[in-house]
Image: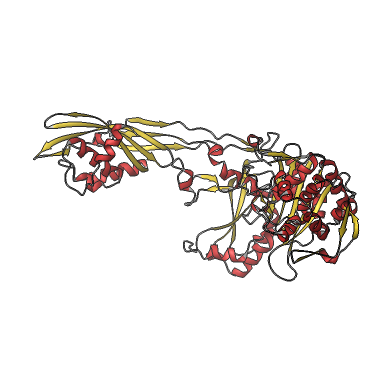
């Protein structure tokens, strides 16, 4: 802070207090009141203020849409009965930003105190009687979001808004039924929109936007229903309906909640990113508006007092590949339960596809949903066992029940394979075998293996994602639960895709969605574990719980059936993680049941499409 600014702050006194003693203090008190928007208090410090003093300041603020003002004093030219105090004003203009003006206050001494001698020039040195302020503002074109090949994933196009005009509705139940049947609109949401306090009978109430091709499909069923209407509008579109919807995000008119977060260069009515990459990288994609502050004389002469040089948005390049994303979308077609599918490049960690369902829910399950990984975590436990000296043919026992520190663990549907090999218990996903084997690991070995696969490692994929956590087990029973991906172990589908990638490449890499984030954390798997781990994962598909995908050459993976919640029996999430030809992926169906029966067919459909 400058010495002048420090003096300003120290000397500022309440405008309601006693008169300041010198011209500097009086000027500072006046500027303090101006910064606080107390125009009435300012008027009380002016010698012979004009009758419309407060109105003039309000008009100045309103014409330029000033959000706030701050002032820094400059030099003081003092004489016996008059003084001049210069200042720098910084006005924050809604939608444009900061506008700096160098001004001055002339003060006169009368009856033992100092007064501001006000003229229009106090507001701006060029302002004269009869002049008016105005401003212009132009937002430049929004930049595109690109895929990994530099092709655009977003473009400007046309959508049709399906809406309702309340006064034309003859049967509200019929309207709700038609919108639900044709477009999946929740009747409860329709009721909320129609019953909102600001809705009048003659208003068009927007319900849902659809692309032209979808509109052509549903129009014959919706148009005959009294009260349903359609409007066309320009919109930002992705390659296909629902394509990477949660990741790319959507754009729309800025909300009241979002406006303060975006800053003073935004104003009501602006079209901005509302979710996903569109929101997270709004300032890069949206650029900055251009504009001018103008002064118009009574003669019509226009003077430009300030310019704001706008900038176009800068394209945002992602690592997505359109053909892989399309395969992910197609694999989830028909899945009615909440689900996620993520694919990453095993050699780099680049995210190639990422999809969450249902589309109408804002939760991006693939990135932000954290779930117990269940038996997919056995990939990590197996790596720890291999690092400790085991191999796929090492002996392993799979009894019906294994008890650790008084806690009993069982296999899914009561399976038991007796005395066999590590390859078999991994392929068949035997819980009791892994509980017993993990108890023989040295203390901390399982946590170290989890860390090699990125658990408890912070990274930024380009959108918020909490990664994975492996809390230190508090006892032997919790260690046993952690070894089969239960207990307090949690991971996102994105992270489990990175686990599968590490199994193929031998090196865990933090997954990333933007090229500039490529140099994230990474770690090598334990020496000598990569090839035997791949052998175990291939056995899952050829002879184990993933046999539903046995027809796909080169596919390897691990199923997971992860318990959660309460009840008897406990509900389960269905998992499958795997890799094929340099692409690793994770499939999750929330509350879907058995991984081998539910997640594996989805994974097979995805992998076959590549």
Residue 334 shows in this picture = no
Q: In this view, does 556 lie above or below 432?
A: above
Q: Report whether 210 appears left or right of 98.
A: right
Q: In which quarter of the image is residue 314?
A: top right
Q: What residue is drawn where x is 68% and y is 60%?
A: 182
| Horizontal side, residue 307 vs residue 87: left or right | right
Task: Indicate the position of residue 130 as horizontal and vertical percent values.
Answer: 25, 37
236 on left or right of 90: right
* Residue 159 visible at all: yes
State the colouring used for the structure image: secondary structure
- State which quarter of the image contains the N terminus: top left
Q: Toward the viewer: 36 or 170?
A: 36
Task: Report the residue at 85% width, 65% height from top.
Answer: 400
Q: Residue furthest bottom?
A: 568
Front residue of 506/161: it is 506
Which image quarter holds the C terminus? top right
Using the rendered view, name the quadrant where residue 115 is placed. top left
Please say if 9 is above or below 558: above
Name the residue rendered at 82%, 46% in the picture: 386
x then y, percent, for residue 543:
90, 53
The spot of residue 378 in percent (x, y) is: 78, 52
Q: Nearer the viewer, residue 127 or 580?
A: 580
* Residue 152: percent from left, percent from top: 66, 37
Within the image, what quadrant is residue 506 found in? top right
Instruction: Please count the marks in the image.
Output: 0
């Amino acid at each position: 802070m400058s010495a002048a600014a420090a003096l300003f702050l120290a000397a500022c006194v309440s405008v309601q207090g006693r008169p300041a003693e010198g011209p500097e203090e009086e000027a500072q008190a006046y500027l303090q009141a101006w910064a606080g928007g107390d125009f009435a208090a300012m008027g009380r410090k002016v010698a012979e203020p004009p009758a419309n003093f407060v109105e003039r300041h309000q008009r100045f603020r309103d014409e330029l849409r000033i959000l706030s003002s701050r002032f820094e004093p400059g030099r003081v030219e003092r004489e016996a009965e008059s003084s001049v105090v210069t200042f720098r004003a910084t006005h924050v203009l809604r939608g444009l930003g900061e506008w700096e003006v160098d001004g001055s206050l002339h003060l006169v001494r009368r009856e033992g105190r100092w007064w501001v001698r006000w003229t229009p020039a106090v507001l701006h040195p060029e302002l004269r009687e009869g002049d008016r302020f105005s401003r212009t503002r132009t937002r430049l074109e929004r930049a595109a979001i690109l895929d990994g090949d530099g092709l655009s994933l977003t473009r400007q196009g046309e959508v049709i808004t399906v809406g309702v005009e309340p006064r034309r509705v003859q049967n509200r139940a019929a309207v709700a039924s038609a919108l639900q049947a044709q477009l999946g609109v929740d009747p409860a949401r329709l009721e909320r929109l129609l019953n909102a306090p600001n809705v009048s009978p003659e208003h068009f109430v927007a319900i849902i936007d659809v692309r032209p091709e979808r509109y052509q499909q549903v129009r014959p069923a919706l148009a005959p229903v009294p009260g349903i209407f359609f409007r066309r509008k320009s919109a930002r579109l992705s390659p296909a309906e629902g394509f990477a919807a949660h990741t790319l995000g959507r754009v729309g008119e800025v909300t009241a909640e979002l406006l303060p977060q975006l800053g003073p260069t935004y104003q009501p009515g602006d079209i901005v990113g509302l979710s996903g990459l569109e929101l997270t990288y709004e300032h890069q994609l949206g650029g900055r508006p251009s504009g001018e502050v103008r002064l118009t004389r009574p003669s019509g002469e226009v003077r430009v007092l300030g310019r704001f040089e706008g900038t176009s948005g800068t394209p945002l390049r992602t690592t997505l590949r359109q053909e892989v994303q399309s395969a992910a979308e197609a694999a989830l077609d028909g899945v009615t339960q909440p689900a996620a599918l993520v694919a990453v490049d095993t050699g780099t960690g680049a995210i190639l596809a990422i999809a969450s369902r249902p589309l109408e829910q804002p939760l991006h399950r693939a990135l932000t949903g954290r779930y117990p990984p269940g038996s997919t975590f056995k990939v990590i436990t197996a790596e720890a066992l291999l690092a400790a000296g085991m191999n796929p043919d090492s002996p392993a026992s799979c009894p019906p029940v294994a008890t650790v520190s008084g806690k009993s663990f069982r296999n899914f549907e009561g399976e038991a394979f007796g005395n066999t090999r590590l390859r078999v218990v991994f392929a068949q996903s035997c819980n009791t075998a892994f509980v017993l084997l993990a108890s023989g690991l040295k203390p901390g070995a399982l946590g170290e293996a989890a860390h090699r696969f990125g658990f408890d490692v912070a990274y930024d994929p380009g959108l918020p994602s909490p990664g994975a956590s492996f809390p230190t087990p508090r006892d032997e029973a919790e260690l046993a639960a952690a070894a089969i991906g239960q207990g307090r172990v949690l991971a996102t589908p994105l992270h489990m895709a990175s686990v599968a990638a590490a199994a193929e490449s031998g090196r865990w890499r933090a997954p990333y969605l933007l090229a500039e984030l490529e140099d994230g954390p990474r770690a090598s798997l334990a020496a000598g574990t990569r090839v035997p781990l791949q052998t175990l994962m291939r056995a899952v598909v050829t002879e184990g719980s993933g046999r539903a995908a046995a027809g796909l050459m080169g596919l390897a993976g691990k199923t997971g059936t992860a318990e959660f919640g309460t009840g008897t029996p406990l509900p389960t999430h269905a998992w499958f993680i795997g890799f094929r030809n340099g692409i690793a992926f994770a499939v999750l169906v929330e509350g879907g049941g058995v991984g081998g029966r539910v997640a594996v067919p989805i994974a097979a459909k995805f992998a076959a499409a590549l």
